[in-house]
Amino acid sequence: MNQFFVRPEDVRKDEGIIYIFGNDVNHISNVLRMKNGEELLLSDGEGNDYHCRISAFEENGEKCVVCEIIDTTTSRSESPAKFYLFQGLPKADKFEHIIQKSVELGVYEVIPVETSRCIVKYDAKKQKSKAERWQKIAESAAKQSHRGVIPEVKAVMKLSAALEYAKDLDMILIPYENYKDIAATKATIAKIMPGMSVGIFIGPEGGFEQAEVETAIEASAIPISLGNRILRTETAPLMLLSVLTFQLEN
């Protein structure tokens, strides 16, 4: 069943209908060629899913699709914990791949972080255009994986600002290649429970500098190991999110 996101204010529960506006109207009518009576799944971005049936295509100043609500459920596709991915900016299109796959794996927010070893640097104009593209990738991945929310991709932050942003989270993890204690890592992961907020700090190509790791630990980050192999920056967050999601959902 095709899924689309709608604004909460366009959900009229008292009337039993939902309005779809914007680019999705063209996609529904001209690309998918859906007709009245066909069913789809709508999500309000706040964790509520609506099984709907198309009842009309209207154009009163702005084109819209009118959908009749058949059933309402709480999204079951969201992770029991909220994972915030603080990703050191990689080069080329690796960050786009990280956004796409981390959204599929249940991440709640993605925060691009500029660290000492980042090769990529964006000026204000470039950041704006990148931010728009990154958010579209997150939305597309959320639709594809039937997420109940669209994870937000935040503006690029310096490491110090990212640690400040993460200070109120329940736990902060920082995988570090020089940390080898697998038993302690397993014990740390076992402490993550449903309802918690967890920050994950991943270094760029070349990893974090020692001083950056020490700064993160001083800010309450817990060093962990991802095993005996050195993982690429685009592999590490996906590996860790997979482990955390599997642990919590089982």
Image (spheres, helix red, strand yellow):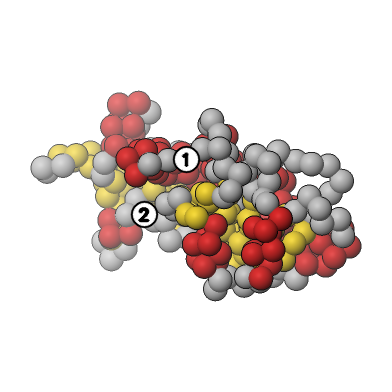
Secondary-structure class at tag 1:
loop
- Label 2 is placed on what type of residue? Ile
Q: Quadrant of the C terminus?
A: bottom right
User: At 28% from the left edge and 66% from the top edge, which residue is drawn?
Assistant: 14
> Label 2 vs label 1: CA separation?
46 Å
- Label 1 is placed on what type of residue? Lys
According to the picture, the residue beneath numbered tag 2 turns out to be 69
According to the picture, the residue beneath numbered tag 1 turns out to be 121
Residue 194 point in image, percent of width and height: 65, 69
Secondary-structure class at tag 2:
strand
Residue 193 point in image, percent of width and height: 69, 70
Above or below: residue 167 compared with residue 47: below
Above or below: residue 93 compared with residue 6: above
Query: Local crowd at mark 1 within 10 Å, few (<14), some, or many (≥20)?
Result: few
The dot on residue 99 is none
Side of 207 where 95 appears, left or right: left
